[in-house]
Image: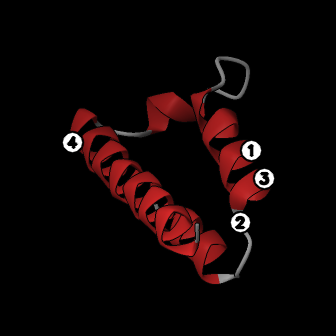
Amino acid sequence: MQVSVCLMESGDPHEDHDDLIELVASDETGFLSLFSQQQLHEFMLFEREYRLSQLELQEELS
């Protein structure tokens, strides 16, 4: 989650952010098994809030 926050603070994290999620979720890397259910739940809630804020920002700019 800390890496995700750093990517968002960097300015334009869209591609890198999506790549990070794909990397963690990939069966090939095995990273997903490093996280507890609670950590994954918190990460998903964080991601949901991030996506909603991005949609709100886009809506305001339109």
CB atoms at circles 2 and 1 under 8 Å apart? no
Q: Nearer the viewer, mark 2 or mark 1?
A: 2
- Residue 53 screen position, x and y as percent: 41, 64
Residue carrying label 4: 38
Q: Nearer the viewer, residue 47 or 59?
A: 59
CB atoms at circles 3 and 2 under 8 Å apart? yes
- Residue 42 screen position, x and y as percent: 27, 50
Q: Residue at x 59, y 72 (%)?
A: 8
Q: Is 25 above or below relative to 18?
A: above
Q: Nearer the viewer, residue 60 or 26?
A: 60
Residue carrying label 3: 15
Counting other residues with Cα less than 10 Å from the Cα at mark 3, is it few (<14), some (14-19), or many (20 or more)?
few
Q: Is 17 above or below relative to 53?
A: above
What amino acid type should be assigned to the residue bearing mark 3? Glu
Q: Nearer the viewer, mark 3 or mark 1?
A: 3
- Residue 32 screen position, x and y as percent: 51, 31
Quadrant position of the C terminus in the picture: bottom right
CB atoms at circles 4 and 3 under 8 Å apart? no
Q: Is 34 above or below relative to 33?
A: below
| Res 37 label | none
Residue carrying label 1: 19
* Cα distance in 3D space between marks 3 and 2: 6 Å
* Cα distance in 3D space between marks 4 and 1: 22 Å
CB atoms at circles 3 and 1 under 8 Å apart? yes
